[in-house]
């Protein structure tokens, strides 16, 4: 019997560079095409924030678990998440794409559809790019954002006494990957839980919403704190009045300062390489330690139900790619933030002076465990 | 006989990601390391200029012709050249690097040495990056620069009557590649010529110097042109005086305007894909045409001596990677520029209204030849 005739798959080679360029440019911001570089307008006085990622077929994504549209979404989300982790607002991304000649054109279209779907959700766009031949599909993304210089979130600013806020569930992306790799697993999950975990892996959401919320909340806290300065002034005036009664004495009142404002510092990064990695990296950069509480870890109930507490905790700590934010800030501000974020956001621990990161169980059901970077994700490990 | 013992080559796999990171970071601007993204300060009121390139082993460079140090230099130079082509000053570059595990560490060190050697020559630096495993060495570079909005050089601004300036020799890079691929060729060349051509291929210089010079020269031309406005005022006053003699007539003098200032526009791009490609791309974007003159083409004498006029011209037009600038601007400004640049800079032709690009020989020794993009470099052509 003859096999049924199939339309040949249209490849990159078949349409040539000019054909491919036309397709790719249809996904880019129109006024930025056609010169040696793209021109972007930044707001005066803001700092430029730049982050770059290089993703390789078979290493960072594969057709087995990820359609090209999902690969595009994830690539954009990962870079926007880095901008969010710095407290920046996105300006745009540049996309370098290396392609074997036999890649179907629909694969490329899917990739750009995914990239722009994610970007448009955050009012951003592709502003530049480059195409080239390569033996392996390679996606190189550079994202640009801007931030007010005094609102940049750095890893190195955590202070003992800060609490640690995690903005959402962890371990879900790793669980979603497991379900994609082994569809026969997770039989105890209902359809909704299954879909939620897979969605967490394929379509993560960078937490740019948290950045905006943070500064809105600060404005809410600030007036309360302004009261501190007034109280100090009253006390100082009282001291001066008393001193005036003793005019024969030379009296200089000791300077009074309020507690450090809760609004002058915030530290953080995203949890792209896992929650444990984020806490450890922040502590290392800030030369502090942390205690995080087992019972407070934000783990999706579906995950615990599926694999039990210990395995769920393992994936929450080391799974990675949840693209939530891990923020260290004063309690007052943190409480407002968690309240406003709602859902799975939580205060999970505190920053300490000892330069070690401990996972503790205040209920006493598990021994304290010291977390190290070596348990985390290592790109070049075999 | 036993073979002599050799030190095993230290590979990327052997030193692991942390070891590799340490090496790479030693080449980066120190205060920009250790967060999710780099922070750059831009000058208020300037536009951000962004360009990206993705380079693949075996496609864009190979160990046969290019040491990793040269590959690094060329990669940085290509991106800085794109910034120069836009009239921008560099702020820094981000480097994404995909590496097979068996790549020797010295290869990586060479690459970064080459990148930073080129960057430091132009007061720029590596400001961010990413490392990952890949089956093929892949270098993804994004360069950022800034420019005053009214000094951005675009392809689309060429006007009929402009002359075309080329800032230096063409074809030398292609000739250098030939000498590297076939060391037995070019026997007629002396050692100096040989070295010059190879240098042109391995260590091209982005023409950021031209950008700076352009605006300095404009300041020199401007006062002369201000005279135009005064002459117009004199003529208008004369007309008004004459009109006043005929007070019974209603007389509105026609507005007089000077010729378009030679200083309001400049078009251009770099010649990374060949001189012919640059002229054609500018004409296409500006909806104009061009006539370029055979006898004015800046071709290194060594090249003509080696291979004769016709082959040398072919490589000058289509060889590519000379990274010079092709600029379209008014004659007055162009003459000053060529005089100041000296050496091999030349006015090679003029912009015309007919939307075609012609190579002409005013000496009548060769027929006019129409140049098209199809003869140029096509990344995906087989």
Image (cartoon, coloured by chain):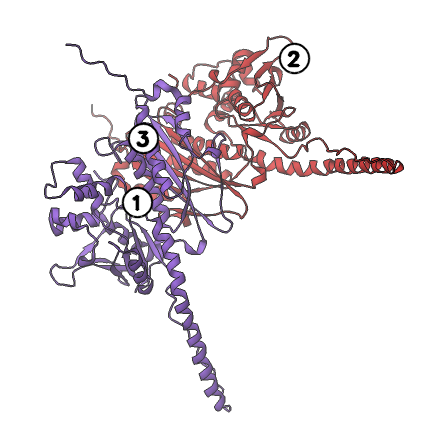
Chain colours: A purple, B red
Q: On the same chain: label 2 and label 3?
A: no
* Total marks in image: 3
Q: Secondary structure at mark 1?
A: loop
Residue B372 at x, y = what percent?
51, 16
Q: Quadrant of residue A106?
A: top left
Q: CA distance from mark 3 to mark 1?
A: 19 Å
What is the number of the mark on residue B362? 2
Q: Secondary structure at mark 3?
A: helix
Mark 2 vs mark 1, foreground winner is: 1
Residue closest to the eye, B55 or B87:
B87
Q: Is residue A148 visible?
A: yes
Q: Quadrant of residue B152?
A: top right
Q: CA distance from mark 2 to mark 3?
A: 52 Å
Extreme residue toward the right, this view? B245
Chain letter belonging to callout 3: A
Q: On the same chain: label 2 and label 1?
A: no
* Picture residue at 41% right of the left edge, 29% below the top: A26
Residue B338 against residue B18 in the figure, above or below:
above
Mark 1 lies on residue: A205
Task: Kindly check if marks 2 and 3 are in contact, taking CB atoms under 8 A apart as contact.
Answer: no
């Amino acid at each position: 019997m003859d096999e049924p005739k199939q339309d040949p798959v249209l490849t990159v080679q078949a349409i040539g560079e000019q054909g491919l360029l036309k397709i790719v440019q249809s996904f880019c911001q129109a006024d930025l095409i056609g010169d040696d570089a793209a021109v972007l307008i930044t707001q005066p006085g803001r700092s430029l924030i730049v982050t770059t990622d290089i993703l390789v077929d078979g290493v960072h994504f594969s057709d087995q678990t990820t359609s090209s549209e999902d690969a595009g979404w994830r690539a954009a989300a990962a870079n926007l998440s880095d901008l969010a982790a710095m407290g920046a607002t996105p300006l745009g991304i540049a996309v370098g794409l290396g392609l074997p000649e036999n890649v179907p054109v629909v694969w490329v279209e899917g990739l750009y559809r995914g990239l722009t779907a994610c970007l448009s959700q955050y009012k951003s766009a592709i502003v530049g790019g480059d195409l080239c031949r390569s033996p392996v599909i390679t996606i190189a993304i550079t994202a640009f954002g801007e931030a007010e210089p005094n609102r940049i979130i750095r890893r190195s600013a955590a202070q003992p006494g800060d609490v640690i806020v995690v903005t959402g569930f962890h371990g879900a992306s790793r669980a979603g990957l497991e379900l994609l790799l082994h569809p026969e697993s997770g039989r105890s999950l209902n359809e909704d839980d299954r879909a939620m975990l897979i969605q967490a892996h394929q379509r993560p959401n960078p937490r740019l919403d948290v950045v905006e919320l943070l500064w809105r909340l600060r404005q809410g806290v600030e007036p309360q704190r302004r009261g501190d300065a007034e109280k100090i002034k009253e006390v100082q005036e009282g001291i001066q009045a008393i001193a005036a009664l003793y005019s024969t004495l030379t009296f200089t009142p000791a300077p009074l300062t309020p507690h450090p404002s809760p609004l002058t510092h915030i530290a953080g990064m995203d949890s792209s390489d896992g929650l444990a990695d984020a806490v450890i990296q922040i502590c290392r950069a800030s030369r502090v330690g942390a205690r995080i509480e087992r019972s407070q870890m934000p783990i999706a109930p579906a995950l615990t139900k599926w694999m039990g507490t210990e395995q769920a905790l393992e994936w929450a700590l080391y799974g990675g790619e949840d693209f939530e934010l891990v923020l260290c800030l004063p309690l007052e501000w943190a409480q407002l933030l968690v309240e406003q974020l709602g859902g799975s956001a939580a205060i999970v621990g505190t920053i300490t002076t000892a330069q070690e990161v401990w996972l503790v169980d205040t209920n006493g059901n598990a021994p304290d465990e010291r977390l190290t970077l070596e348990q985390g994700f290592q790109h070049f490990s075999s």
